[in-house]
Amino acid sequence: MRPPRPEPPDHTSPGHTPPPQAPARRAPWWRGRGVERREVGFWRALWREPGQVVRIMLWSVLEAAPAFLVGHAVARAIEDGFARAEPLVGMAWLAALGVTWTAAAVAARQVVLGVAAVAEPFRDDLLAHVVEGALRRDTRGDSAAVARAGLQVELARDAFAAVVTTVRGFVFTVVGVALGLLTLAPQAVVLVLPPFVAGLGLFLASLPALARRQRAFLLADESLAEAMTDMAGGLRDIEACGLQEGVAGRLRREVGEQAGAARALARVTAVRTAALAVGGWLPVVLLLAGAPWLLGGGAGPGVIVGALAYVTQSLAPALGGLVEGLGVSGVRLAVTLRRITTAVPAAGPPRDRARPPTADVRLDAVTFAYGPHSAPVVDRLDLTVPEGDHLAVVGPSGAGKSTLAALISGTLRPGSGQALVGGVPADRIDPAARVLIPQEAYVFRGTLLENLAYLRPAASPAELDAAVAAVGATDLVAELGGYGATLDPAALSAGQRQLIALVRAHLTTAPLIILDEATCHLDPAAEARAEEAFARRGGTLVVVAHRLTSALRARRILLMDGAQVTVGTHDELVRTSPLYADLAGHWHPEPVS
Amino acid sequence: MRSGDRLVVGIVRRGGPWPVVLAVTAVAGAAGELAIPYVIGRTVDLLVARQPGGGTWLLVCAGVVAGVMVCESLGVWARGASSAHAAATLRLGVLRHVLGAGHAATRRFPEGELVTRAGLNAEETGRAPETLMSALALLVPTVGALVALTLIAPLLTLTLGLGIVVILLALRAFLRASTVIAGGYQEVQGEIAARLVEAMDGARTIAAAGTAAQEARRVLAPLPRLRARGMELWRANATAAVRSGLVVPLLEVVVLIVGGFMLAAGDLTVGELYAAARYAVLGTALSTSLGHLGGLARARGAAARVAEVLALPSVPHGTRTLPAGPGTVEFRDVTANGLTVGDLTLPGGSVTAVVGRSGSGKSLLAALAGRLTDPERGTVLLDGVPLRELSRAELRRAVGYAFERPVLLGDTLAEAIGRAPATGPRDASSREPAVVPAGTAHSVVEAARAACADVFVRRLPLGYGTPLREAPMSGGERQRIGLARAFAQGERLLVLDDATSSLDTVTERQVSQALTADHLGRTRLIAAHRLATAARADQVVWLEDGKVRAHGPHDALWRDPAYRAVFQGAAP
């Protein structure tokens, strides 16, 4: 297994996360964007494997041997062999060419393997980047985004390999041909190289435009696919709301934009093709035009054919490969790399974590809003929960209960005010000092033991048994086949998953436990048992209640209703709060008769 | 002619000048490419022999090369432009048609299938003319090269033929091996993706426990296996490349050797030897050009799939408008899809609850009331006008629908609730974003308030202007936006199909109060599981096994134990 590299400590940033849109340094188009903390650039992937790069280079020399030899072999076979009625000499030259070609094929295989040995770690890096980024987000992601990211990674790997292969092949072939021409017919160099360089220049000049068009096309195509997916998924609602006109308008716009981008791409591709033609064909014409001059200089007809072979056999295909490699794969690599690096949020600087001396919770005028212009979810909330207290949080859905739980556990930071646990800012405390169990219980593919001991891997079997028994999960453990059983999260019911998460929390030594509707899928009896276990466990307990019965078990109740927040016991609240009375009257399942 | 082929012919006919340009460049380019080796060989011979025609042939040579260059560039342009044009035309037609066919389209094709057909298959169909031309443009020089080679020396063609067979076999072996290995590779990829999705479901737990690094290690644990599979794939690839890549140069060497002997014997000139070697290389492209013919078969298949979508029937609408009325809904002898409604009236301004176990036809009844489905027999009328005879705009203005799982459309929340403004591109002005952006209709906020959505919408990063894609919403919040949309839309009839199932009891009660006290006096049809909904309704329609078992006031029905049993075990 290859453990991900530890994040290097950041000495430049103070203890705050950098602004989300840190200005990215303008990087060359092929490098993806800026410099991320975990750099996943093109060059880095190459330089990291110097041994492989040397190996690729050495085999490339052999692979390019025919590019050097082809003209000589053809020229000598004709001049010294067939034209002089010495066919065996001619055959020997051509046989030598055949052998070189065979050797070059073997070398080509080694080159592919060498490139693969660089491309595979590159892919691993990208994948790790995507995975770590996805896990850094604290919102639930969707599987479609994961699939898209996976596809991008594969595209980037293939494009990376193609770019390395073709650019390298081009360079070695050009060097081989140049050396061959220089030794075969030095004058011919003047006829071949200028038009070839002109074609190459034309192509390179068209490359930025090509990259832009290609990127524009990919984006337009994706946007269109998104619009079509939205339409197909919303047909019922489109019909029910009579939205056909609007949706058709959006689709028309998207289709038009995609087609426009495709046409623009076709235009630059035509220029690219022209560059290829200039670089590949013009040398042929010039060689023919200069043939009398070459012949006058003492070259034989075999030399002319040999020089032609250099151009048609080696130079033109190499240029074609470069055009394809840079023009298509290179652009794709740039686009996908940029996509991968921008889609993933950069890691925040590591923070100093402190273990609070006590487990009391204090909120001082805490305000939190999800956007700078949106209404606050929690508005100037003051709250004190002494150590060892048992607080229930109630209120209609959307009242901000989960936001409060996140603020106390420190996964969200207040916009203003302070959330303190034991006097330490909640987002600064050691994760081991408090446990948050959210509504959607997390169970992963692994053994039951790994899942239960997730937050305290060193727990002893006795402690484990005690926690299981306390929460009421003994039957579940037996049913699943013991601690060693491998879990398939999808096969568990929501209630079973919640029980596992509850045991996990109970097992820890954390003095502060926050249950955010963590028992909502349990039946009332199981819920009561689990909550009583946590109350007996000691430490501070904050329960975001799903049923009113949870609130009745608590020592104190916090009622949240938008800006209005009231704390009291059940009896006090029933008397003073109409909303609480309303909740108390209707929270129970409706009577059947 | 098959409908798919008709589609392709139609594309060519409506393609403007592009198909012609495509054809001309393809044919001329192919001819030029075929001529080049001969012309070059001939020029070399004349120049070497210092014969007088050399200059002329040089000019011919330059002309042919220039022609091929122009044809190639123009061809690439024409190919891109023609397929873009064709695909766009076709795709728009398909999409409009799907929109016209409405909800019924998803009953015939799954959503993903519709997207594939309108996307990928339309693209492939649009490329049909190009594919045909490319196949021809490749086939002509390859076949021509083989003929030319045969004219120079039949023996060379024979050698070449053998070589091509070897290439085809090598490619086939490669394809067979790589699908197996690629399958293994994708399996490991899928495993990593599954682990990641699983971990992302536990995002809050992981964030709180600070175990992101540990989770990343766990998710990436199969990476070494992925790399091993990847290397296997590369090895297979490299081996096949060696095999097929070696055949062409070796063939050329053989052709040169055989030709060399003929040169020595005086049967061949130097120029002809050069031409023979080039023709041999051109001829080996035969397998590639045959592959392009396969592309044509794919394009035909794609066209057939697109044609199937175009064959979906569209929903016809009338032209009538509604007279003034309270919104009375009448079912007359209605039967649809296994549900017999018979005669049923929802008096204007009344609240009707539809109850029954799952699968008893509640959603179907709701769909019939606002013409999301047409009955097989009978008529549904709104204020005396059969729904079929209403124009689409009139019908949708009159009826508002809310669903259990609404799909929200539009760019922002405001647009998702009210209709998107019909103006062109939204201006991305630099004004300070407000919670209620300028231009948001008052009715939108009103409707959101009635649906208990206003408070949470205002808490989103950009309030009503928050882009839908960036608004994380729970099932209940989504339902409330869906309700607001229905409130903002239907002027006479509101149909709520299990549209409050994910709301907590308090919120549900608030929504119900807003609904009961609807100041517009709209007729309401509510399919629901909750007892309270039925108890508050003016009348209850009780469905069982595809029939209306009874209808009347809740209190009257409540005496029947079977009616009470409907609510047993229902979620609160």
Image (cartoon, rainbow, N blue to C red):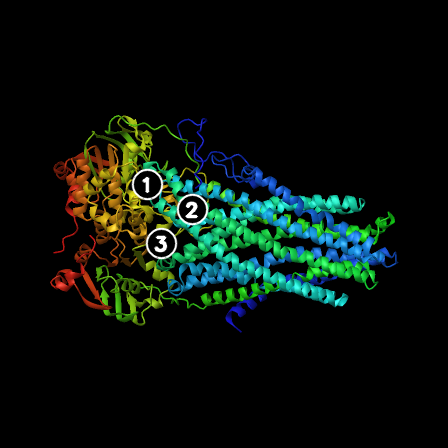
* Front label number (1 vs 2): 2
Q: Earlier in the sequence, mark 1 or mark 2?
A: 1
Q: Which residue is mark 2?
A: B222
Q: Is residue A393 visible?
A: yes
The answer to whether A127 appears left or right of A274 in the picture is left
Q: Chain of mark 2?
A: B
Are the residues flagged by discs 1 and 3 in contact, CB closer than 8 Å?
Answer: no
Q: Which residue is mark 3?
A: B407
Q: Amino acid at mark 2?
A: Pro
Tag 1's secondary structure?
A: helix
B130 vs B452, nearest the viewer:
B130
From what the image shows, is residue A240 above or below residue A38?
below
Residue drawn where x is 63% and y is 42% of the image: A57
Residue at 34% of width from left, 36% of height from top?
B210
| Crowd around label 2: few <14 · some 14–19 · many ≥20 (10 Å) | some
Q: Between label 1 and label 3, give the one nearer the viewer.
A: 1
State the image coordinates of residue A509 (x, y, percent, origin top left): 25, 33
Separation (CA) of disc 1 from disc 2? 24 Å
A163 over B165 or under it: above or below: above
